[in-house]
Image: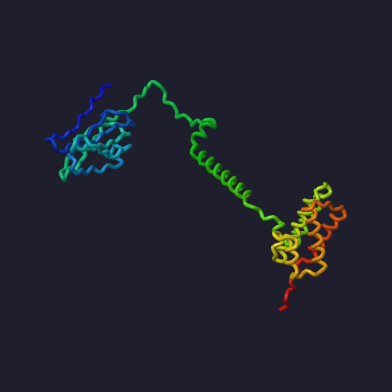
Amino acid sequence: MFHIVLVIPLVATAQPGSSVVDARIDTNVIRIGEQVRLQLEVSHPEAVSVIWPAIGDTLATHIEVVRDSGVDTAEATPGSMRQVRTLHLTAFDTGYWAIPPFRFIVNGAPQETKAMLVEVRTVDVDASKPIRDIKDIVELPFSLLYWIRMHALWLLVALATIGSLIGLLLYLTRRKSTIPVMTEAVALPLTDRVLAGLRSLEAERIWQRGDHKQYQSRLTDLLRGYIEERYRVPAMESTTDELLRELRVSPLNTDQRGRLENMLRLADMVKFAKALPSPQENEQMMASAVQFVRETAPRPEPVGHA
């Protein structure tokens, strides 16, 4: 079948420095449904304004615009600009169809390209063969790889979200574990705390293992700490004599001050004179300390009646 050679459209001839509009197609013979590429071009000096023709979805009754690239502007030569726009056209009816001229307004003056002709031919059909029915839609088996490829973006977003949540939970868990927890002993009243310390010391059975000095030191430290907080005197930093002088003006009675003095003197003998107390003295020391704390414990104030 003979094909007509590409139609050469109008190229406006002009003097150097003037504007030129051009339109060309890559072929003027297509089969029904095929596409033809049409290129519009304007060459003009740099300071010239160009108004392009309005191009919609169709150029003529039988010519449809499939794709429009838009106008692309570039510098052709120094002081000269080149604007190019490419249209992809198609037709679904056989025959000879005209592409109308394109009208440009270049620096206020109209310029047009020539009309072009496109022949749309039908698809060759072998009449000797029977016409086949349209094939049914074939459902492809499920492919995990294909599904992952199609949903890769969403899978990456989901994995990133899950990873962020896990990281946040780990951060909050570690941060929570580093926050100091207030022990129950800190919240207990003074008397309960000291008695709990004495019971813990007794349960360790330190003097039974021969360490009398550590036993006496820890026991009197508990007593001194109790007295310092209870009576607001520097019991931890004072010697035994200094502490007893401070307590002369305290609410302690004579018997209580005497028992406290005996305990402090015995502890001093063990700590500084390397005295060795008997088992009875160690046991009596603990009993006296517990009795002293309980007797001198602050009494709750009575609730006033309205």
* Image quarter in which the N terminus is found: top left
- Color scheme of the displayed model: rainbow
Q: Position of residue 129 (x, y in %)?
A: 40, 21
* Image quarter in which the C terminus is found: bottom right
In this picture, is 185 found above or below 34? below
In this picture, is 85 found above or below 187? above
Q: Extreme bottom residue here?
A: 306
Q: Quadrant of residue 285?
A: bottom right
Between residues 237 and 123, which one lies in front from this camera angle?
237
Q: Position of residue 265 (x, y in %)?
A: 80, 59
Q: Extreme left residue here?
A: 15
Q: Position of residue 91 (x, y in %)?
A: 31, 34
Looking at the image, which residue is at 78% across and 56% down? 268
**Left or right position of 34 against 47:** right
**Left or right position of 168 against 31:** right
**Residue 30 in view, yes or no:** yes
Q: Quadrant of residue 197?
A: bottom right
Looking at the image, which residue is at 26% across and 34% down? 38
Q: Position of residue 66 (x, y in %)?
A: 33, 37
Looking at the image, which residue is at 34% across and 32% down? 33
